[in-house]
Image (spheres, rainbow, N blue to C red):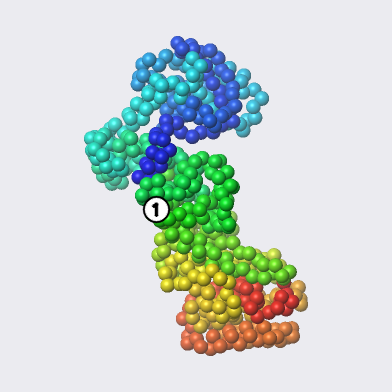
């Protein structure tokens, strides 16, 4: 990953002195060439001038920036003036030809603060204002002497842990340090965490990094965080880092442009690119994985799921070396799942199902309707990792999570809106299970064609791999048919109580089939389609050895699948006029 970021930094033109920052306005403190204060001016913030403002975030908070460019504290401008003074004071020794600014004299701060407040009159409180300085008409980024001073300040970092050695990234022998990592999840201040512990002179042995690589990696990281950060699922973001195995020249120019240009430019390019179909496997509207999946295996991708907490960075998941061909497999599995869940609607149109990783996330995002559960999220990350790498996942591991959400959605099944929500949850559960199976079990075949018959449909579901599962699935479809009939006749479906909140055991389920048939006969709705479902379910359950070797979660899951997927089953055994909405 670090080598990939370094390469990206080189492609982008080398180290970049400034960090990205945004604001609504900029307050500029003007000084003449001798450093005497001239006054304050207010200008609109310009993205193109960020390089000239030369904002550079500091590791600590005193001052918060390495340059006298920082976010203005509008309530207490003197604090911002003090931070700007401290930043300039620390840079001045590296370039003595820089003028001594009146910013050094605290007795002038009240005048500066008054000038700033005057310029900010009329600005809304929520507007963000950047504070910077300009000397003799030039911003800090326009002055070569100031840029040299800042670069020298960069090289001062990590000197306590610097030696002459071989860089872990570029492999060259030069000055390296063990304390200049561009990522905050690496630290040397905890004994036992890395080689050297508290002894900074020994810490370089764990991660020797040269300053040139540090600067290039930081440039690559800035680009990735600004332009290649995407939404994977609700509230979950990832960084996409491309690794050019055979060099950037081996990659199609369109792909290289998409990975290296600014987000706004990429949006325009994606809009103009002619693509027959646009597929998204994540929740991001700017998802570019579909395009990357069409590239040859001349590159790989790294997926970094990282979050910041109180100034620290924590890795939730890191997936490395994902080839475009593997992405194609994921998109193919997505397409198969969507074809399986496509079905006719009552008006003769088609219901088009869409699967993304957000579908899978739905079953791991909540411990209850109002809270996130870190333990559940760790299981979600584990499944994401396994699907990307093709590592097998047992049904018995996944099904309890799916059933938890299914049962949660069966709150008041007599309410029509709850009934519909339940059906959608069941369809999502099957989609999640099928996608995981298709992407983690190499022996499962994938057909992108819609199944032509009910038998083809059942065969196309990897989850239905034995007689008991198929029998329970068909029993579930017949049960859903009866519930719809009952709701149509009575305006409610009291038979839901017989399903015991989907916590039935084998004995309950064995008695359910005749009960459903009897209810359908009571409503005079046991016709040809119902007879087919009843017969097929009976045959499969009859061929299942007793006792049934499945837990309560699994038994009820396959029944629920049949209930939720009744519309798909109905496509094969009913005419549209026969099925009530």
Using the rendered image of the protein, determine whether residue 366 is visible from the camera's viewpoint: no
Q: Residue at x 51, y 53 (%)?
A: 291
Q: Is residue 477 left or right of residue 146?
A: right
Q: x%, y% of residue 436?
A: 48, 66
> With respect to residue 396, does 82 lie above or below?
above
Q: Residue at x 40, y 52 (%)?
A: 299
Q: Residue at x 46, y 65 (%)?
A: 439
Query: What SS does tag 1 mark?
Result: loop
Q: x%, y% of residue 317?
A: 42, 53
> With respect to residue 54, does 569 lie above or below?
below
How many numbered circles does the render carry?
Answer: 1
Q: Which residue is mark 1?
A: 298
Quarter in which the C terminus is drawn: bottom right
Foreground of the two, 379 or 443: 443
Q: Residue at x 70, y 85 (%)?
A: 527
Q: x%, y% of residue 563?
A: 62, 74
> With respect to residue 257, does 436 lie above or below?
below
Q: Is residue 486 left or right of residue 409?
A: right
**Badge 1 density bin: few <14, some 14–19, many ≥20, Cα 10 Å:** some
Q: Image quarter for residue 148?
A: top left
Using the rendered image of the protein, determine whether residue 16 is visible from the camera's viewpoint: yes
Q: x%, y% of residue 12?
A: 43, 38
> With respect to residue 350, does 216 lie above or below?
above
Q: Is residue 391 left or right of residue 42?
A: left
């Amino acid at each position: 990953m670090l080598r990939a970021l370094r390469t990206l930094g080189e492609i982008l033109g080398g180290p970049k002195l400034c960090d990205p920052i945004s604001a609504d306005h900029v307050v500029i403190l003007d000084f003449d060439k001798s450093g005497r204060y001239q006054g304050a001016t207010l200008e609109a913030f310009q993205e193109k001038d960020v390089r000239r403002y030369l904002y550079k975030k500091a590791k600590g908070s005193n001052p918060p920036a390495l340059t006298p460019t920082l976010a203005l504290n509008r309530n207490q401008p003197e604090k911002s003036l003090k931070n700007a003074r401290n930043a300039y004071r620390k840079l001045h020794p590296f370039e003595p030809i820089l003028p001594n600014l009146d910013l050094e004299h605290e007795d002038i701060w009240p005048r500066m603060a008054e000038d700033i407040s005057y310029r900010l009159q009329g600005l809304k409180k929520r507007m963000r204002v950047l504070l910077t300085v300009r000397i003799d008409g030039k911003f800090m980024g326009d002055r070569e002497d100031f840029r040299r001073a800042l670069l020298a300040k960069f090289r001062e970092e990590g000197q306590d842990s610097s030696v002459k050695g071989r860089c872990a990234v570029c492999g060259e022998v030069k000055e390296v340090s063990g304390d200049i990592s561009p990522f905050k999840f690496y630290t040397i201040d905890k004994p036992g965490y890395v080689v050297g512990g508290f002894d900074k002179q020994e810490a370089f042995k764990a991660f020797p990094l040269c300053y040139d690589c540090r600067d290039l990696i930081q440039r690559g990281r800035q680009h990735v965080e600004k332009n290649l950060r995407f939404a994977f699922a609700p509230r979950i973001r990832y960084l996409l880092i491309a690794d050019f195995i055979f060099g950037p020249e081996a990659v199609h120019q369109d792909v290289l442009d998409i990975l290296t240009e600014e987000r706004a430019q990429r949006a325009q390019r994606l809009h103009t690119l002619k693509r027959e179909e646009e597929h998204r496997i994540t929740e991001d509207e700017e998802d570019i994985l579909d395009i990357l999946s069409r590239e040859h295996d001349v590159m790989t991708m790294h997926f970094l799921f990282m979050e910041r907490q109180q100034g620290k960075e924590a890795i939730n998941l890191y997936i490395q070396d994902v080839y475009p061909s593997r992405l194609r497999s994921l998109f193919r599995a997505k397409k198969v799942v969507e074809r399986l869940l496509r079905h006719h609607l009552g008006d003769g149109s088609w219901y088009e199902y869409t699967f993304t990783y957000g579908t899978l996330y739905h079953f791991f995002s909540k411990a209850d309707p109002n809270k996130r559960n870190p333990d559940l999220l760790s299981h979600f990350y584990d499944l994401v990792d396994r699907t990307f790498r093709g590592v097998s996942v047992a049904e018995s591991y996944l099904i309890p999570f799916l059933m938890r959400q299914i049962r949660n959605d069966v709150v008041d099944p007599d309410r029509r809106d709850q009934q519909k929500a339940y059906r959608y949850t069941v369809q999502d559960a099957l989609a999640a299970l099928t996608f995981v199976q298709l992407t983690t079990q190499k022996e499962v075949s994938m057909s992108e064609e819609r199944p032509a018959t009910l038998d083809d449909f059942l065969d196309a579901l990897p989850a239905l791999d034995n007689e008991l599962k198929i029998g329970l699935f068909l029993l579930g479809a017949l049960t859903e048919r009866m519930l719809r009939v009952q709701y149509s006749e009575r305006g409610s479906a009291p038979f839901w109580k017989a399903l015991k909140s989907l916590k039935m055991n084998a004995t309950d389920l064995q008695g359910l089939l005749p009960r459903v048939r009897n209810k359908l006969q009571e409503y005079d709705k046991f016709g040809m389609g119902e007879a087919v479902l009843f017969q097929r379910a009976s045959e499969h359950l009859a061929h299942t050895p007793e006792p049934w070797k499945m837990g309560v979660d699994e038994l009820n899951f396959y029944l629920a699948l049949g209930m939720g997927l009744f519309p798909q089953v109905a496509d094969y055994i009913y005419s549209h006029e026969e099925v009530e909405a």
